[in-house]
Image (cartoon, helix red, strand yellow):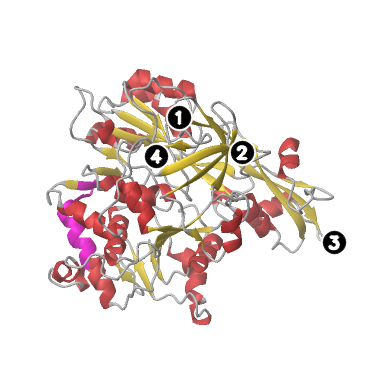
Amino acid sequence: MLSSDSNILRSSIPVVIPTERTVGEYVWHKLNSFDDNNVCLIDAYTGQQLTVGQLKHQSLSIGRALVAKGVTKSDKIAFYGHNSIQHSVLRFAAYFLGLPFCPLSPTFGAYEVGHEYRSTGATIIMTTNDDLPKFKDVIDNTDNNTVNVVKLVVIFDGQHKDYLTYDQLLIDDGANDGQSLLAARVPYFDVDPDNDPFIYIHTSGSTGSPKCVKLKHQSILILMHERGHFLDPDIVSSPGALKKHCIAFPYPFGHISGSAILPLQLCMGYPLVIYSQFDEHLLFKSVETYRITFLGTFPSFGRRLVDPDVFSRYDMSSLQIVNTGGAAFPGNVARDIIDKYNVIFREGYGMTEYLFITAGRNIADEFKSGNCGPVSPGTECKVADLATGQPLGPNSDGELCVRGLKLFAGYVNNDRAFGEAFDSDGWYRTGDIGHYDPSGNIYITDRLKEIIRVADGNLYVNVSPVEIEQFLLTHPSIAEAAVVGVNNRSGTQWPRAYVKLNSGQTTVVSDIDIKKFVADTLAYTKQLKGGVQFVDNIKRINIGKVDRKFYRNMV
């Protein structure tokens, strides 16, 4: 709804103030309200299932074993690896202990893993056998690093001769002692919910290098108490709607989406279907097998839902809700999905710094492409004029600015960036361009941000051009570099680098050499598939920043 004071958007839904003080306490209470025999997690790839009772027992047992291994309140856990039931249980062990954790994107190479592990101050590594080599530099240098000493390494899957494994932690707990030790005290360590972070996670680096965001327990708790948002399957209230839902969970645990949505949706009491190895046909088949009612999707993946081959090959008649977020969804595709599957289609809007800015459209309203719905409870939003900063009225594009209860707590070791992210009245500047209609529904129309949107299987990955530029400058032959996104046929982008070589350069350096330099170290999403072009100078704006608009216009 639109507030009466100066074009400020506020929700008409009251905020539910949680009685719990920590995420671990909330999750524990929720799980105890469910039948222990109910299945809560299903891995569509392996067929493995986990009941509520098993989740509680295993996460508490692992928590006890970690304490016995010397884990303390001062530790932070870095998670890296694909979605799996073991990964999920380890996350819940962190909730119940009250330890902050640091998800690392599954797209990262060794360079990014080392940088982000150190910047978060993590002390515990939890990863897979296949991904462990990406931590080699971190582990090898631990003796020379008094800030990030690697205290413990835990392997999700299989066995390892040097490090603890998931199965060993369960054995080390002993006979059910974990229940008695932790169950009466969740979280195990003292947590100050108003100050202690629940999660440390890096941004995409939209206007500079990626920054490490701190999200407090209070922000997550407010999110988990919201109902009717676009990730809530209980919004379905039609007479023919199923009363029992099953939720497809394609969100990677290494992203903010997976990290925040995992406890949120599991605490709704419905089984989540996860994908330890993602394949679109596996997802379609899982809808048929498990009678999934609620499906999260992405623009690039959503197109496949209306493919005649998919529609005729799989029985997905159980679907009731399809939701999307993270990027604009083509309106014609959304309408085709609605028509083919007779579902509710909802779009949402949020970001790492502020989870769920909007609640998704009211399902009683007619579908309109781009409608992300009204602002969520406890959130204020304004659309600021790009020249004056003044709040604009309906149907006028400007920069979306927000403030409210779910706002992030800061950037780790970067107070300057935190201060610069707000205007003089305390509004967080999202960097997104949009407007709202007379009913207060928000539409995103453009981006001020400079991120490159790269397709990664079933989702988009935000890639920082500055991060790639900084890495290119470590090449001995490169003096300056500018990186922008180049549009491709899939509707996403590939990074392209404009490179100025050192003056007096005698060694012959080709575009292939530079592509290989990046590919050997950075994540595959940051490889220069858009090409490398050599230039005499790098054009900059008057404050010294790369004039990225100039290079985008050259594409």
**Disc 1: which residue:** 441
Q: Quadrant of the C terminus?
A: top right
Q: Do the residues labelled 4 and 1 touch (CB within 8 Å)?
A: no
Sequence-wise, which precedes: disc 2 or disc 4?
A: 4
Q: Is mark 2 on a helix, strand or loop?
A: loop
**Disc 3: which residue:** 506
3D distance between C-alphas at marks 4 and 3: 59 Å
Q: Are marks 2 and 4 in contact (CB under 8 Å)?
A: no
**Disc 4: which residue:** 376
Whether residue 276 is visible, yes or no, is: no
Dot 4 alpha-carbon crowd within 10 angstroms: few under 14, some 14 to 19, many 20 or more: many
Whether residue 219 is visible, yes or no, is: yes
Sequence-wise, which precedes: disc 4 or disc 3?
A: 4
Q: What element carries label 1?
A: loop
Residue type for callout 1:
Asn
Residue 88 placement (x, y as % from top left): 30, 55
Residue 43 falls within the magenta-colored stretch: yes
Residue 98 falls within the magenta-colored stretch: no
The magenta-colored residue range is 40-61
3D distance between C-alphas at marks 3 and 2: 54 Å
Dot 1 alpha-carbon crowd within 10 angstroms: few under 14, some 14 to 19, many 20 or more: many
| Residue under the point 30% across and 70% down | 190
Examine the image and state in which quarter residue 339 appears.
top left
Q: Is mark 4 on a helix, strand or loop?
A: loop
Residue 394 placement (x, y as % from top left): 54, 27
The residue sitting at the top extreme is 339
Examine the image and state in which quarter residue 549 appears.
top right
Residue type for callout 4:
Ser
3D distance between C-alphas at marks 4 and 1: 11 Å
